[in-house]
Image (spheres, rainbow, N blue to C red):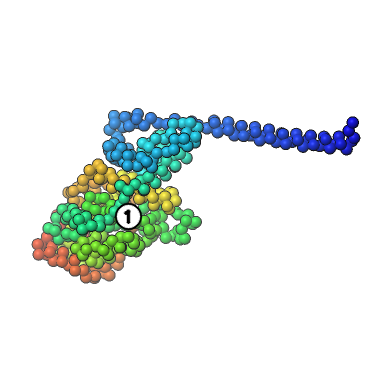
Amino acid sequence: MFDTEDTLQLILDMEERDKEVLSLLAAREGAIEEQSQKEKKTMFKRSDWDYHVEQLRHTEEFLKRYNMTEESFYKLLEMLREHLTVDTHQSCRNSRGNIPIIPEVVLASGVRFLGGVRYTELADIFGYSTASAKEIVNTFLCAVNRCPQLLIELPSTSEELRKHADQWDNLSSAFHLYYGVVGAIDGWFAFINKPSSKAVTNQTDFFSEKYQRYGLNVQAVCDSKLRFIYLSISSPGKTNDAIAFHRAKSLQKWIEELPEEYFLIGDNAYRLNSTMLVPFKGSHKRNEFNRSYNFYLSQLHMRIEMALGRLTSKWRIFRRNLDFSLAKNIMIIEVAVKLHNYVIESDGVHFNSIPGEMSFGDFGVESLEIGPIEDRGYLPSGFYLDIETQTELANERRNNIVDGIRQRELLRSDYNMFRNNDADT
């Protein structure tokens, strides 16, 4: 027999054990239910890539959808394949045994993303979750950025500089007076959402009063074939081009080492000096030979406007605000520029004609819906420097060119005269 106290203690012990058992059972049931809920998640049906491509071949829309020929797409795929290939075991585990996402789809997703397709649309097109779409795009961006064949590089050797100068000279109708141009520079105001206060010290630095939008100041230099040879995204959108230009340290170093016969061309957002030719402004522009100088300089400088306009027309993600982190926004711009270059080179796109003979639309540039009249498909980033200060500067290179124009009595083309006369009126 048990006495009363022992019996009471035994009952209490049994009740305590029962509580523990019930607690364990409840936890087990919860885990089973949670697992059951996971198993009930949608099993996304992967798109059939081969069938997708076959459809595009049939409708002849591969180029339209992917902004490059099918041949260039697969060539790019092989360049990036190593970094586009996902871990098969991990992919199967994460997707509950679904077919792993192949490199073709990763590349296609990234290219369509740059073309303006959103994450949710990518998920619908290729048969994966929205969360997967974000991971896939990140994989694509990193793969392009680390690809050595896609690097953006300034010409450095004497042979490269001479080749660039020859190509620019072939575009000019000014009888070699501008020989020595090795690049055209301009600033681009790339739209972004208001940056987080945690990411930047002063959000207003990114806000342009001129455009009433937040953005980044992108400094870009192109060659005569509309390929970018330099890119700097080191300044917020409110920054003047002249300041952003001097913040581009690697470009400054390259310019300092340029042989004296070579130079860049820019607009009046930049300062005139021995390595930078810009147009005449203000009262100096009234001289007919100065105007001719401006015309022939503009004839070449328009290449950077075409390049930036073509970039934002082809990769339509830039037709809206980039709404990611600052770091990702910058990466998107860098990747788009690299693929812009790749497509021109791989598809053999040639732009030998000069403005006046062809319109900007003929160069693949579409106007912005929110842009100023006759915009070039993008918004310039900087404000022009003070007219009087800019035009009073003496420059031997520019003076020599004007003297050559005067000696040859070179006049502007008729279409330029009519256009400028209308503008003056």
State the residue lying farthest toward the front.
1
Quadrant position of residue 28: top right
Where does residue 60 sit, x and y in percent of width and height?
A: 27, 33
Where the C terminus falls, by quadrant?
A: bottom left
Q: Is residue 179 left or right of residue 128?
A: left
Mark 1 neighbour class, 10 Å CA radius: few under 14, some 14 to 19, many 20 or more: many
Where does residue 406 sit, x and y in percent of width and height?
A: 11, 64
Viewer-side residue, 424 vs 112: 112
Viewer-side residue, 87 vs 235: 87
Q: Amino acid at mark 1?
A: Leu
The residue sitting at 58% across, 33% down in the picture is 35
Viewer-side residue, 260 vs 128: 260
Task: Please say if 190 is above or below 390.
Answer: above
Q: Is residue 378 left or right of residue 131?
A: left
Task: Please say if 210 is above or below 348.
Answer: below
Residue 338 in view (yes/no): no
Q: Is residue 55 left or right of residue 415?
A: right
Quadrant position of residue 36: top right
Task: Please say if 79 is above or below 100.
Answer: below
Residue 72 in view (yes/no): yes
Q: How many marks?
A: 1
Where does residue 93 sit, x and y in percent of width and height?
A: 49, 34
Task: Please say if 396 is above or below 69.
Answer: below
Local secondary structure at mark 1: strand
Quadrant position of residue 128: top left
The residue sitting at 15% across, 66% down in the picture is 400
Where does residue 305 sit, x and y in percent of width and height?
A: 27, 53
Where the N terminus falls, by quadrant?
A: top right
The residue sitting at 21% across, 58% down in the picture is 158
The residue sitting at 21% across, 47% down in the picture is 351
Pointer 1: what residue?
Answer: 231
